[in-house]
Image (spheres, rainbow, N blue to C red):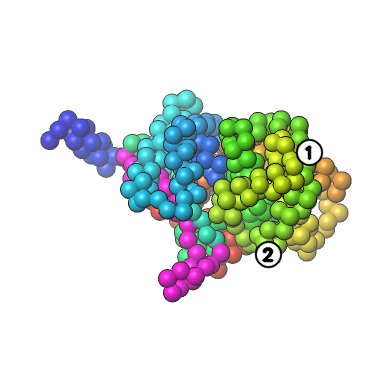
Amino acid sequence: MSSTDRVEAKRRQQRASLPYPPPGPLVVAGVMSGTSADGVDVALVRISPGRSDGTPRIKLLGHTHSAYPSRLRAAVLAAMDARSISTAELARLHWRLGEVYAEAILAAEAQLGTRAKLAGVHGQTVYHQGAPAKYLGTTLRCTWQLGEAAEIAARTGLPVVSDFRPADMAAGGQGAPLVPMLDRVLYAHPTRNRILQNLGGIANMAALPAGSTEVLAFDSGPANVVIDGAMQRLYNKRLDRDGRTAAKGQILQAVLADSLRHLYFAEPAPKSCGREEFGGTFVDRFIAQCRTAEGADADVIATATALTAESILEAYRRFVWPFLGQHAPLADAAEYIVAGGGSRNASLMRMLREGLEPLGIEVSTSDDTGIPAEAKEAVAFALLAWLRWHGLPGNVPSATGAKGPVLLGRITL
């Protein structure tokens, strides 16, 4: 037996003898890498069943972000938008991402001085088809997140919950959005309507009527994915930092109006989307339309930013406003709480405020509630891992369209 084999055998023996965490309070590492493929967010969260109604108590202990190396990010983006890719490439990327997630967890523990007992790893989505479509003589939904859980467990010594979305799909749901479980735990309020908006690659929103257990949640369309794609193509930059480039441009109204006719925006909720709808092909066509309209580079970015803002505002008017009217008086105070990297885009936030504040809606970010905007999704998957470990359902059927509550995720020891 080689020295490497002996070390690995000893590690397996040590892990086999570990007292895996019993039900109850746990420090959980939530790990998220989103549609933007900019890197890995890790949140260390203490979760305990503290309330009389069984609602978990959540305390964020700290969070970290590590950017993907440029070559890895290029490989991830290529896998997302690929019309064809070798199985060898996908297999290697799956295992490499497992290594990266494990390294991110270990680095977060070292940086924050806290040891986790459980990990919840979303993985990197390379394909998501929430709506049923025909394939090989049947109709199905499907989703695929990369990042080998066995590799993560071996390197960290932690039990790992992964593959959160398939169980909801098997129950007839779209497998997304899943963050509304966290929204309901943290933000449900007896007298205030609250709308939780996440601005990652894709924009998703959850509406919580005052004093109600009902939730409406769905993906409204692009958040950063079109902006980032255009920035990469036109400026060779990953993102429009602080919305500075958009602030220099003019919105091409004809292009914006045409883009808002995309069929996805009119589809009823619950619904979900991804790069399949708004990735590279959409971005290339969008830039070509802007060029036809004689738009400068900054105009392309301004128009992409306006597309995100206007599609969100239209989703609010079309779906959220009627929903709140059915479940809570619209005259009640309403709060609009934004999380995700897009909350740092000043141009996008200005457009949202200009559309929402005249309606009497207060716009803030999750930072104001104690959850840093960049950490929220990682916190959500820490909670979903805690629920799975305790044998509790993690989906919100009204958000995903599933037939009922189900256990989300597979446990790898």
The magenta segment: 131-154
Query: Label 2's element?
Result: loop
Residue plotted at (76% across, 35% down)? 249
Q: How many marks?
A: 2
Residue 269: give its label. Answer: none
For disc 1, the marked residue is 250
Q: Residue at x 17, y 30 (%)?
A: 3
Q: Quadrant of residue 330?
A: bottom right
Residue highlighted by disc 2: 268
Q: Is residue 141 left or right of 52 when viewed as pictured?
A: left
Q: Nearer the viewer, residue 279 or 384?
A: 279
Residue 154 vertical placement versus 189 (above, below): above
Regarding residue 160, the answer to whether it shows in the image is no
Residue 327 placement: quadrant: bottom right
- Please check the rendered image and state whether residue 339 is part of the magenta-colored stretch, yes or no: no
Q: Position of residue 334 (x, y in %)?
A: 79, 48
Closest to the observer, 176 or 209? 176
**Residue depth check, mark 2 versus mark 1: number of the one nearer the observer:** 1
Residue at position x 47%, y 25% in the image: 111
